[in-house]
Image (cartoon, grey):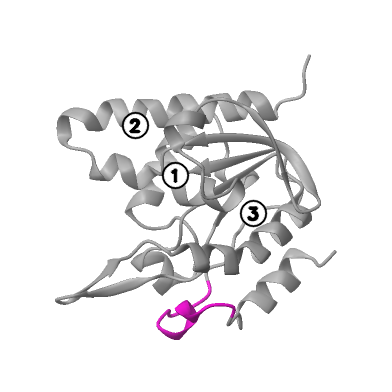
């Protein structure tokens, strides 16, 4: 089993799909080996691509707030994405996010399997449909799975899956629905934290 350092070094030169051609950097996961919780998002955003770290943009700030309210330490969790390169299109002076294709998700699943094996979390949290699709399969729907601890096997790893919305969904919600979306994210993260704690 490769270490996380070795995996990150290998992933830095990944050419398993074409996304590396337009990305600034491979954005690998970060966090400690043995973290009880692994949170998996979709793909890096514009800020993450430029900084080379996961969840450091606007959605990351929402996630940080939600983790704090859920009594989950970001420093003790492992954060990553299903796809490690930013997929974007031109939007004037801005780079606009584009969702990864199924082919790109499957190509990048190798790294997700390796991260799960190296970290060994008790619980993996799927943040949104792309993460769920990467972990479970293309039939995954957030609404059918969210907030419920479920058994999951990915490669050599087996543990518990808890699904929820991606924090960017809170940002995309209209102002009236935003508080409800955020509260739902916090509630699901609390379920994940509870599932990661040993019984008794």
* Position of 193 relative to 90 (above/below): above
Query: How would you rate the neighbour count of disc 2 (Cα within 10 Å): few for under 14, some for 14-19, many for 20 or more?
Result: many
Report the residue marked by disc 3: 31
Mark in front: 1 vs 3? 1
Q: Is residue 70 visible?
A: no
Mark found first going from the N terminus, 1 or 3? 3
Say whether residue 197 is magenta: no
Q: CA distance from mark 1 to mark 3?
A: 20 Å
Q: Is residue 121 visible?
A: yes
Query: How would you rate the neighbour count of disc 3 (Cα within 10 Å): few for under 14, some for 14-19, many for 20 or more?
Result: some
Q: Position of residue 75 (x, y in %)?
A: 60, 47
* Position of 127 relative to 195 (above/below): below
At 45% from the left and 36% from the top, the residue drawn is 142
At 71% from the left and 26% from the top, the residue drawn is 197
Q: Is residue 66 left or right of residue 12?
A: left
Callout 1: SS: loop
Mark found first going from the N terminus, 2 or 1? 1
Q: Position of residue 170 (x, y in %)?
A: 30, 39
Report the residue marked by disc 1: 128
Rendered-image quadrant of the N terminus: bottom right
| Residue 182, label in figure | 2
Question: Is the stretch drawn in magenta largely helix, strand or loop?
Answer: loop
Q: Position of residue 45 (x, y in %)?
A: 38, 63
At 22% from the left and 29% from the top, the residue drawn is 177
Magenta range: 16-26
């Amino acid at each position: 089993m490769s270490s996380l350092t070795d995996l990150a070094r290998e992933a830095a030169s990944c050419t398993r799909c074409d996304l590396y051609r337009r990305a600034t950097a491979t954005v690998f996961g970060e966090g400690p080996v043995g973290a009880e919780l692994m949170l998996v998002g979709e793909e890096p955003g514009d800020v993450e691509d430029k900084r080379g770290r996961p969840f450091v943009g606007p959605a990351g700030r929402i996630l940080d707030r939600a983790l704090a309210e859920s009594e989950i330490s970001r420093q003790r969790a492992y954060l990553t994405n299903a796809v490690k390169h930013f997929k974007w299109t031109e939007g004037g002076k801005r780079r606009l996010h584009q969702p990864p294709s199924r082919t790109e998700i499957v190509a990048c699943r190798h790294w997700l399997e390796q991260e799960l094996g190296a970290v060994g979390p008790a619980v993996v949290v799927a943040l949104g449909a792309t993460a769920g699709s990467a972990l479970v399969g293309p039939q995954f729907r957030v609404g059918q799975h969210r907030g419920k601890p479920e058994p999951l096997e990915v490669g050599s790893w087996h543990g518990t899956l808890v699904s929820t919305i991606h924090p960017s969904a809170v940002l995309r919600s209209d102002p009236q629905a935003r508080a409800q979306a955020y509260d739902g994210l916090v509630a699901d993260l609390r379920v994940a934290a509870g599932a990661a704690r040993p019984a008794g």
